[in-house]
Image (tube, grey):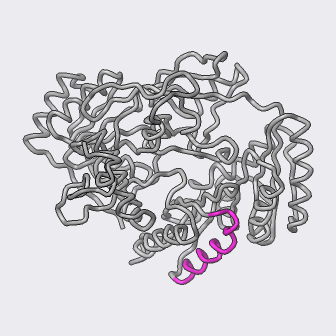
């Protein structure tokens, strides 16, 4: 059910807008309702909040000045990149400032000798690999939205992508960050060296969803383009056989660059959108990609083909060149948007389960959907059990949006009871924060709050995200009242 909030234009925000105009320029500060409404949501349109003020930053100094003035005024701020997030992580505050970073797009020359590059947060993910390609290098994290998503947003949510099974998530590919803390102070976390002594503050910052500060510069690790890449598309008559193939590949000691899975409904949507030519009649398909030294890839590829046939694959296609490989990936990469061809509305969910439980979890999702009279298209990173169920519904049918929202929540709880997590790469944001208490104990959540409050004691950085509603109505989010067990043990303190 869509939640909408209107901007709060108080004396405080009106005065702040004037100070911001003086600091960053009148043309970069928006308060007109028609203009600011453009930024009322990110990729999750079920929650909409119109911000009081929008600042279009074009430099680090603009970010510093905006954050400092918000801190001084006690006004909350939310950082936003390309707006492609799917958990409401960039949802504005009605009485606050939305700090837009999409104009910070400087991409420094690639340092090929050290395999790294420094970028501003508004740089688009795919641009990094584009610039690295002439040096035979690439940037590994590749979300499906890599054509439009920004590096700053990837860092905020610790984005992954199809190749995270082998290469890991964003956190594994960021060496350093220049960060504006919630009081306007500029700090540097990590650096250009591969490792740094002391507490891993950079690791804490990546995936913190904008609650610890705003990144204005990021140094990224690049990888060498592998000698060989081979991709196959495999069709199955059952989800169980497709899921079993994934487990068998990993059990054989093979670590593919990617193993992606789509069910029949997701295939139907992809065909309608991009005519990807997947095997006709397939109940499930796998896109399997291996990369590395030529000899190793060829040997493992033959082994994977044997495993797939042993699991009753009825069709196996091997990409002969880059064009065929791109076509195999086209259906998978377009799957989220493609669902719009077969349903007026849909939720994109994100959860994680042990990959050995794929068959039973997918069967339970189908049962829960049937019970509510809904359909679910499943698209996911099968290799690491990161599910992306797409819950289809029609807003025009009374009550169906509510049923879809209930089903999306039930899927997350199913992931938890199956030994998994409520998010793999989309983040918690606004959408999943009430599920955090299902996965973590109160002590866990309070410990996380200790870290958050160390960075942002006044709670002005992206408030209302990640953590559940306070325990008491009207209670301000922050550290718990009373002594935390960590404090009692002498292991930590509240700042």
Q: Is residue 463 left or right of residue 219?
A: left
Q: Position of residue 285 (x, y in %)?
A: 76, 61
Q: Is residue 121 left or right of residue 113?
A: left
- Look at the image and say whether residue 365 sits in the magenta stretch: yes
**Outermost residue toward the bottom?**
371
Image point (21%, 53%), residue name: 6
Q: Can residue 452 be seen in this snapshot?
A: yes
Q: Is residue 311 left or right of residue 410?
A: right
**Outermost residue toward the front?**
489
Q: Where the C terminus falls, by quadrant?
A: top left
**Outermost residue toward the left?**
11
Q: Position of residue 114 (x, y in %)?
A: 63, 18
Q: How many numbered tags mark residues here?
A: 0
Q: Nearer the viewer, residue 376 or 243?
A: 243
Q: Is residue 151 left or right of residue 272?
A: left
Tell me: residue 118, above or below residue 491.
above
Q: Where the N terminus falls, by quadrant?
A: bottom left
Image point (10%, 34%), residue name: 15
Image point (51%, 57%), residue name: 423
Tell me: residue 376, above or below residue 135.
below
**Quadrant in which residue 173 is drawn:** top right
Q: Which residues are magenta?
A: 354-371
**Quadrant in which residue 68 is drawn:** top left
Q: Position of residue 185 (x, y in %)?
A: 28, 26
Q: Position of residue 344 (x, y in %)?
A: 50, 65
Mainly helix, strand or loop, the magenta region?
Answer: helix
Q: Can residue 35 be seen in this snapshot?
A: no
């Amino acid at each position: 059910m869509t939640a909408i909030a209107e901007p709060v234009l108080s004396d405080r925000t009106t005065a702040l807008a004037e100070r911001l105009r003086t600091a960053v320029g009148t043309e970069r500060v928006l308060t007109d309702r028609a203009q600011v409404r453009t930024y009322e949501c990110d990729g999750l349109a079920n929650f909409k909040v119109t911000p009081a003020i929008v600042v279009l930053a074009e430099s680090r100094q603009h970010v510093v000045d905006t954050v400092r003035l918000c801190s001084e005024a006690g006004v909350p701020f939310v950082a936003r990149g390309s707006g492609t997030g799917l958990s409401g992580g960039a949802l504005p505050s009605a009485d606050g400032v939305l700090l837009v970073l999409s104009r910070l797009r400087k991409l420094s020359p690639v340092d090929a000798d050290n395999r790294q590059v420094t970028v501003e947060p508004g740089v688009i993910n795919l641009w990094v690999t584009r610039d690295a390609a002439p040096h035979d290098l690439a940037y590994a994290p590749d979300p499906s939205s890599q054509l439009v998503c920004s590096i700053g947003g990837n860092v905020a949510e610790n984005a992954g992508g199809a190749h995270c099974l082998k290469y890991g998530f964003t956190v594994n590919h960021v060496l350093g960050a220049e960060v504006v803390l919630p009081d306007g102070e500029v700090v540097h976390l990590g650096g250009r060296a591969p490792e740094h002594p002391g507490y891993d503050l950079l690791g804490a910052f990546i995936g913190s969803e904008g609650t610890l500060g705003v990144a204005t510069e990021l140094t990224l690790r690049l990888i060498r383009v592998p000698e060989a890449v081979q991709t196959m598309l495999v069709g199955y008559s059952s989800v169980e056989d497709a899921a079993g193939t994934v487990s068998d590949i990993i059990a054989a000691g093979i670590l593919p660059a990617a193993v992606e899975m789509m069910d029949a409904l997701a295939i139907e949507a992809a065909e309608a959108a991009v005519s990807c030519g997947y095997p006709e009649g397939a109940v499930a398909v796998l896109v399997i990609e291996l990369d590395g030294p030529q000899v190793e890839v060829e040997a493992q590829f033959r082994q994977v083909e044997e495993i797939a046939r042993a699991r009753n694959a009825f069709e196996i296609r091997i990409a002969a060149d880059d064009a065929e490989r791109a076509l195999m990936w086209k259906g998978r990469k377009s799957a989220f948007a493609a669902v719009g061809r077969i349903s007026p509305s849909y939720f994109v969910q994100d959860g994680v389960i042990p990959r050995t439980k794929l068959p039973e979890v997918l069967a339970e999702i189908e049962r829960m959907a049937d019970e509510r009279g809904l359909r679910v298209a499943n698209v996911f990173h099968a290799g690491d059990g990161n599910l992306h169920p797409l819950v289809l519904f029609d807003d025009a049918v009374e009550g169906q949006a509510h049923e879809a929202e209930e089903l999306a929540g039930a899927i997350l709880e199913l992931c938890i009871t199956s030994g998994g997590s409520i998010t793999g790469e989309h983040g918690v944001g606004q959408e999943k924060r009430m599920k955090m208490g299902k996965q973590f104990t109160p002590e866990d959540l309070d410990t996380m709050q200790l870290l958050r409050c160390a960075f942002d004691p006044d709670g002005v950085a992206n408030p209302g995200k990640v953590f559940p509603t306070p325990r008491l109505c009207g209670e301000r989010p922050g550290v718990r009242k009373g002594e935390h067990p960590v404090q009692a043990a002498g292991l930590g303190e509240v700042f």
